[in-house]
Image (spheres, rainbow, N blue to C red):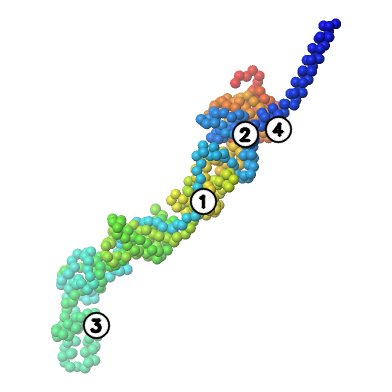
């Protein structure tokens, strides 16, 4: 009897203990589950998962060291992943920014001018060329200038010409004066000599001496150099024959080859500073005289002719001048050239917004200005752009599907079919948006064994797959996590991984 009562009391105590444990478990289980599925930091921010910012795609459910790089995994917060407060952008923590080595630059307005340097060769200004000819038959009795390229001054004797044909008209004129005929006949004889191009100086000497003069001296009509010497002493000359060609040196031409992209910005009369290539201390003033209508098809250049002041007589044909062409000044909006990402059809920059988020922005670029590039549209003065680390930010953004690829939508539509990768592994967990799988090496991607999340194309995909299943699966690049499952097949029981 006593034994029966003792057993009954023991059973009652066991039942009470089990009920208390059950009740206690029901009241504490929800908080434990919430803590396991939604970990948070000390500042209360909800952590979705951890990842390696240098290797897009794999997700980890706890902090630790990355299996890919020698660095700690970085948490992904719920407010960052959803883009809360930064629509159209992506948030990157300061620590990650430092690890990525991101540098920033401001969009600024600078004053520039369409200036450039060109090298030109000195040539004679052909508009200053003069020729010395004879208007009568005769021969050169004496030659005063005997070599080409000799410098001469205006009025300097060049040659003495003997013209027998001038003796007859002069003797006739002198005879009429002595005979005392009417003044009209004397004037007519004088006009005949003038028509025969007998120099007035020669007629004056004939009148003073009373003897016909047939020798006259050819003089230089201007300063310059004898660019062409067409006679020698003793040779016969004929009317219209060029005996000398004198090139002026007060001004010279500098002819330079100008690229067509720069030639279109030149205007006639534009000022230029010419520096002697052999002696930078000597400079000259000049102006753009003409852009010759001739394009060199091989070099895509045009010839520009500059008129350079040479009153000192320093410049001679063949010398090289460095021409410093100064265009009109203007203000332009510029960014560092390294900040511009050129995709072929587009030019993109990564802009840092006021809240610290990043967003890509299409821009229209203008001229290259050394280390800077002109921005025609797409940016405002004072905007902050990423000067280095743009592609790493794009990689970070791919994890959140905010920035997406830098490629344009048209380019994405024309992209080739995605490459499929195969692997085998064990399903660790199943969620509506994906599967977490501990898989072996992936040869096509050179991945080692790891545990990571793969996205599903839809929540209804792979309904029969359960945690703990050994599976053989195929996946491709894409989806919210960077990799999306294409097929998942349960492996037969007893299959070894």
- Total labels: the figure holds 4
Q: Which numbered dot is residue 42?
A: 2
Residue that appears at 51% across and 37% down: 99
Q: Earlier in the sequence, mark 4 or mark 1?
A: 1
The residue indicated by pointer 4 is: 460
Which badge, 3 or 4, comes first in the chain's sequence? 3
Q: CA distance from mark 1 to mark 3?
A: 78 Å
Front position among marks 4 and 1: 1
Q: Residues within 10 Å of mark 1 (few under 14, many from 20)?
A: some
- Mark seen at residue 194: 3
Chain-order first, disc 1 or disc 3 = 1
Determine contact: label 2, label 3, CB under 8 Å: no
Q: Earlier in the sequence, mark 1 or mark 2?
A: 2
Horizontal side, residue 93 vs residue 252: left or right: right
Q: Which residue is mark 1?
A: 107
Front position in the image: 108 or 119? 108
Where residue 155 sits in the image (x, y, percent)?
22, 73
Residue 181 found in image quarter: bottom left
**Could you say whether the residue bearing mark 1 is in a helix, strand or loop?**
loop
- Give the residue at x 21% y 93%: 182
Mark yes or no: residue 214 visible: yes
In the rendered image, residue 231, in percent from the top left (x then y), is placed at 20, 68
3D distance between C-alphas at marks 2 and 4: 36 Å
Q: In the displayed structure, would residue 51 be above or below residue 301?
A: above
Q: Please report whichever mark, 2 or 4, sits nearer to the chain's N-terminal start.
A: 2
Asked whether the residues under the numbered discs 4 and 1 touch, taking CB atoms below 8 Å apart as contact, a structural biologist would say no
Q: CA distance from mark 3 to mark 4?
A: 116 Å
């Amino acid at each position: 009897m006593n034994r029966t009562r003792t057993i009954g009391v023991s059973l009652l105590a066991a039942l009470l203990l089990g009920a208390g444990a059950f009740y206690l478990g029901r009241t504490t289980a929800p908080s434990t589950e919430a803590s396991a599925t939604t970990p948070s930091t000390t500042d209360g921010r909800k952590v979705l998962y951890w990842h390696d910012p240098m290797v897009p795609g794999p997700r980890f459910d706890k902090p630790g060291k990355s299996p890919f790089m020698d660095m700690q995994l970085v948490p992904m917060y719920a407010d960052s992943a959803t883009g809360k407060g930064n629509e159209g952008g992506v948030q990157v923590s300061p620590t990650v920014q430092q690890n990525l080595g991101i540098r920033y630059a401001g969009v600024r307005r600078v004053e520039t001018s369409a200036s450039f340097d060109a090298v030109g060769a000195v040539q004679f200004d052909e508009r200053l060329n003069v020729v010395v000819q004879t208007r009568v038959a005769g021969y050169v009795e004496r030659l005063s200038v005997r070599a080409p390229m000799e410098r001469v001054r205006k009025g300097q004797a060049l040659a003495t010409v003997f013209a027998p044909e001038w003796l007859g008209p002069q003797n006739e004129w002198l005879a009429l004066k002595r005979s005392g005929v009417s003044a009209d006949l004397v004037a007519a004889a004088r006009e005949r000599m003038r028509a025969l191009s007998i120099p007035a100086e020669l007629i004056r000497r004939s009148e003073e001496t009373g003897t016909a003069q047939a020798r006259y001296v050819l003089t230089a009509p201007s300063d310059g150099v004898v660019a062409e010497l067409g006679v020698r002493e003793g040779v016969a000359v004929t009317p219209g024959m060029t005996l000398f060609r004198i090139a002026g040196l007060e001004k010279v031409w500098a002819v330079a080859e100008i690229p067509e992209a720069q030639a279109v910005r030149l205007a006639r009369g534009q000022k230029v500073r010419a520096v002697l290539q052999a002696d930078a201390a000597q400079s000259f003033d000049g102006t753009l005289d003409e852009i010759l209508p001739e394009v060199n098809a091989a070099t895509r250049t045009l010839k520009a002719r500059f008129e350079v002041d040479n009153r000192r007589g320093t410049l001679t044909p063949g010398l090289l001048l460095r021409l410093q062409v100064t265009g009109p000044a203007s203000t332009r909006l510029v960014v560092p050239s390294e900040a511009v990402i050129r995709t072929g059809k587009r030019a993109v920059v990564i802009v840092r917004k006021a809240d610290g988020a990043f967003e890509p922005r299409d821009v229209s670029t203008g001229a290259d200005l050394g280390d800077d590039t002109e921005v025609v549209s797409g940016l405002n003065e004072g905007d902050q752009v990423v000067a280095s680390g743009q592609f790493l930010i794009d990689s970070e953004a791919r994890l959140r599907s905010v920035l997406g690829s830098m490629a344009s939508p048209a380019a994405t539509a024309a992209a080739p079919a995605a490459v499929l990768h195969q692997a085998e592994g064990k399903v660790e967990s199943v969620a509506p948006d994906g599967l977490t799988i501990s898989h072996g090496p992936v040869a096509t991607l050179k991945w080692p064994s790891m545990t990571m999340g793969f996205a599903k194309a839809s929540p209804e995909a792979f309904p029969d797959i359960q945690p703990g299943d050994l599976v053989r699966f195929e996946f491709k690049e894409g989806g919210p996590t960077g990799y999306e499952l294409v097929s998942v097949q349960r492996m037969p029981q007893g299959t070894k991984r």
